[in-house]
Every structure is written in C-alpha cells, then in structure tokens.
Amino acid sequence: MPTTIITTDDLRDFRIELLQDIRKLLTKQTSGNLKRYMKSSEVMELLQLSSGTLQNLRINGTLPYSKVGAIIYYDSEEIHKLMNQNRIHNKFE
C-alpha cells in the first residue's frame, strides 16, 4: 500500500481552495440567490445533511419548519440563525 506524503505546500493549496469555496458560498448567500423558504431537499443539499439528520433537527425542535400539505418548508433566516448560534470560535486561524 503506497503512502502519500502531505507537504506544507499541499496544505497551503488546500487552505486556499477551501477559502475560495467559502467565498463562493458567501457570495451566493449575499447576492440573494437563496430563497426565503426552502424545501427539505434544498436544505439537505445546502447543509450536506442526510434526511434522517434533518428529521432529527425537526423532531427535537432545533430547526423550525412549516408544513403545507405534504411539503415541509424551512425559513432560510432560521437556518442562518441556527448556524450562528452554533458557531465555534477557535483561538487559532
């Protein structure tokens, strides 16, 4: 089994790539591309969650939702509030 050595240059490249991806997400968010009310599938894609995890967030009251007929909707502002409330501040950059 071959081993791969990760260098500091590899880590630097990864960091730059990650920051670019975060900037793209933030740009998408601030440009108004996110809808006010999102369906479950959209929330799962946005937060990279499974349907079971999203259901658990609904059941335990972590993420408020509205149900119209058989479709469950989530307020994007509530999702942002949840993310901000669970933000972890590290001392390291």
Image: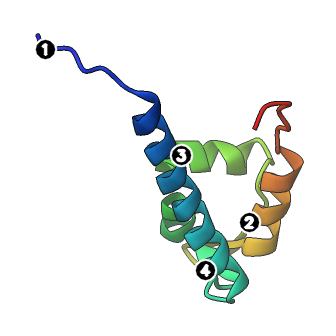
Instruction: Using the numbered discs, state the Cα–Cα distance from disc 3 to disc 1 in whole angstroms.
Output: 25 Å
Q: Earlier in the sequence, mark 3 or mark 2?
A: 3
Element marked by disc 4: helix
For the residues labelled 3 and 1, say whether their Cβ atoms are less than 8 Å apart: no
Around disc 2, counting alpha carbons within 10 Å, would you say few (fewer than 14), some (14 to 19), or many (20 or more)? Answer: some
Element marked by disc 2: loop
Instruction: Using the numbered discs, state the Cα–Cα distance from disc 2 to disc 1 in whole angstroms.
Output: 48 Å
For the residues labelled 4 and 2, say whether their Cβ atoms are less than 8 Å apart: no
Closer to the observer: label 4 or label 3?
3
For the residues labelled 4 and 3, say whether their Cβ atoms are less than 8 Å apart: no
Q: Quadrant of the N terminus?
A: top left
Q: Earlier in the sequence, mark 4 or mark 3?
A: 3
Q: Earlier in the sequence, mark 4 or mark 2?
A: 4
The residue sitting at 61% across, 87% down in the picture is 33
Q: Earlier in the sequence, mark 3 or mark 1?
A: 1
Q: Which residue is mark 3?
A: 15
Q: Which residue is mark 2?
A: 65
Q: Is residue 64 above or below residue 48?
A: below
The x and y percentages for residue 89 are 85, 38
Element marked by disc 3: helix
Q: Earlier in the sequence, mark 2 or mark 1?
A: 1
Q: Which residue is mark 1?
A: 2
Instruction: Using the numbered discs, state the Cα–Cα distance from disc 4 to disc 1 in whole angstroms.
Output: 40 Å
